[in-house]
Structures are given as structure tokens and as C-alpha cells.
Image (cartoon, coloured by chain):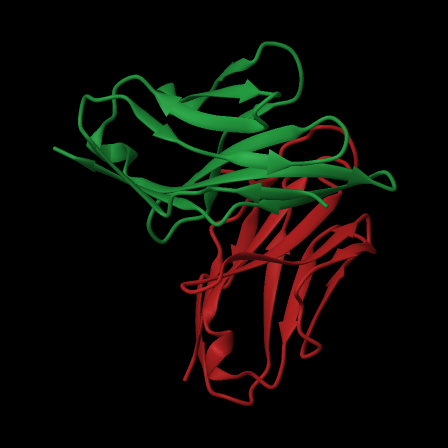
């Protein structure tokens, strides 16, 4: 069965420091992985995705994610956090079954960036 | 702006009532997904449509139903509403049923049941 785990409910980091939001996945076949960000009272915004190719994927707002097949992980990273990065982050994996997509989302990680 | 439009943005209704939430997908997108987000249960997948046909069902209650119309817009019908149905309901769309296409979310419809 497909699944996504975000082991941390909350991550706290000081502004200017690097941040990591963790995600591990379980999928049969090739994983298609995504990160989304949700600001308060807003919809989920697409940040980046891994389909194939380079394991380091760059996305919006300076975020990047590293695909690690052996560890089945897809951690979200940013070299220098901003207070405005404070939001809820969701990892997702796509399953293709019977020629249609189904997306599985993690439980979300709340990122708090303190000045 | 994701291109996915949801109406209404906010809705307050009484228990036992019925409401309809509407979603217009991004131009050209054939797949529509509905999700429910509540404080204690995170993001829950409800149902998916592709080009008018139901393709996948998640944790959707029998009191809830959905459909996708020929013009590809979708509606989520919630009936016999209970206090616990208060949540943020998201619609999302993607370009096709398969491939690695990204799923894009609308801004959501806030439903408050009183």
C-alpha cells in the first residue's frame, strides 16, 4: 500500500538557519513525490516534485528536496529559513493505478521560523 | 493563483441542512479531487473524478456525494449536516488521469455547521 509519513508534527528553526522537513514514503513502483505548503486560511500551494532524474529537486521560494531511494525519503530543505516560511508543509506521493492518479498526503508538518 | 476556483469561500449553515460546494478546475484539467481538512484529522481524500466518471473513493460519508459535469466543473453535496462536518473542503485538479502531472488546489470552502 502507498503511504507517506511525516514524522514531525512541528519543526522549529531560527531565521537564517537551515531547515529540514522530513518525509518518508512507501510505494510500489517508481515514486512520484511532491511537496506542498499551506499558509493560514489558504489552499495548498505546489512547491516542487520529483519524477525522475537528479535526486536534488529545486522548487519555489528557495526550497529544495532530496530524493533518497535507499532510505525511501524525500526531505524538504532550505539553506536559510525566513520568518515568512512559517506554514504547514505536506509531502505527497502519487500512485498510478488502472491508468489514473491517486495522491496520498502526509499528516503535515508545521514549520515555525522564529526571528 | 492555482487556477482552481471554489465557491463559496465561506458558508455557515445549521445541522440537518444540505449544502453544495462548487469547483471549477484549471483550464484543460480533466481530473478533479475533493479533500476535507479538519483540525484533528488533517487532509482527508474524499473522492476523485476523471472526465465525468468517478475514479476513486476515499473516506467519503454516505451523506456526501459528488459529480463532475460535462463542462468538467464539479460539485460536492453535503447533506444531513452534523457539527463534525465543519471543515475546510478543498477541490484540486490535475491535467490527466495518469502521468506525473501535479495536482493543484483551490483556496477551499470553509463550512461551519452550527
Q: Determine the image quadrant of residue B21.
A: bottom right
Image: A56 above or below B18: above
Q: Colour of chain A?
A: green
Chain identifier matching the red colour in the rendered picture? B
User: Which residue reaches farthest right?
Assistant: A98
- Which x, y percent locates residue B104? 58, 40
In the image, taking residue B33 as reference, residue A76 lies left or right, namely left
Relative depth, front residue between B73 and A66: A66
Relative depth, front residue between B28 and A70: A70
User: Which residue reaches farthest bottom?
Assistant: B16
Residue at (69, 49) in percent of width and height = B32
- Which x, y percent locates residue A58? 47, 16
Image: A14 above or below B26: above
In the image, taking residue B106 as reference, residue A69 lies left or right, namely right
Relative depth, front residue between B77 and A54: A54
In the image, taking residue B38 as reference, residue A100 lies left or right, namely right
- Which x, y percent locates residue A85? 29, 33
User: Which residue reaches farthest front?
Assistant: A70
Residue at (63, 40) in percent of width and height = B26
Residue at (59, 36) in percent of width and height = A25
Q: Determine the image quadrant of residue B40.
A: bottom left
In the picture, which quadrant includes the C terminus of chain B? bottom left
In the image, taking residue B56 as reference, residue A106 lies left or right, namely left
- Which x, y percent locates residue A46? 50, 34
Amino acid at each position: 500500500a502507498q503511504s507517506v509519513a511525516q514524522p514531525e508534527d512541528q519543526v522549529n528553526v531560527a531565521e537564517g538557519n537551515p531547515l529540514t522537513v522530513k518525509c518518508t514514503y512507501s510505494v510500489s513502483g517508481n515514486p512520484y513525490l511532491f511537496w506542498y505548503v499551506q499558509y493560514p486560511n489558504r489552499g495548498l500551494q505546489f512547491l516542487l516534485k520529483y519524477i525522475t532524474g537528479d535526486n536534488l529537486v529545486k522548487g519555489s521560494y528557495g526550497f529544495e528536496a532530496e530524493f533518497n531511494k535507499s532510505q525511501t525519503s524525500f526531505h524538504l530543505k532550505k539553506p536559510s529559513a525566513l520568518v515568512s516560511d512559517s506554514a504547514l508543509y505536506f509531502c505527497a506521493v502519487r500512485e498510478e493505478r488502472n491508468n489514473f492518479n491517486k495522491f496520498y498526503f502526509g499528516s503535515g508538518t508545521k514549520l515555525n521560523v522564529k526571528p | 493563483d492555482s487556477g482552481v476556483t471554489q465557491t463559496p469561500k465561506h458558508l455557515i449553515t445549521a445541522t440537518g441542512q444540505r449544502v453544495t460546494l462548487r469547483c471549477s478546475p484549471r483550464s484543460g484539467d480533466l481530473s478533479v479531487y475533493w479533500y476535507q481538512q479538519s483540525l484533528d484529522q488533517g487532509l482527508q481524500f474524499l473522492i476523485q473524478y476523471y472526465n465525468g466518471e468517478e475514479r476513486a473513493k476515499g473516506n467519503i460519508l454516505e451523506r456526501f456525494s459528488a459529480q463532475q459535469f460535462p463542462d468538467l466543473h464539479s460539485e460536492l453535496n453535503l447533506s444531513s449536516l452534523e457539527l463534525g462536518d465543519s471543515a475546510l473542503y478543498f477541490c484540486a485538479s490535475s491535467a490527466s488521469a495518469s502521468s506525473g502531472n501535479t495536482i493543484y488546489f483551490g483556496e477551499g470552502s470553509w463550512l461551519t455547521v452550527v
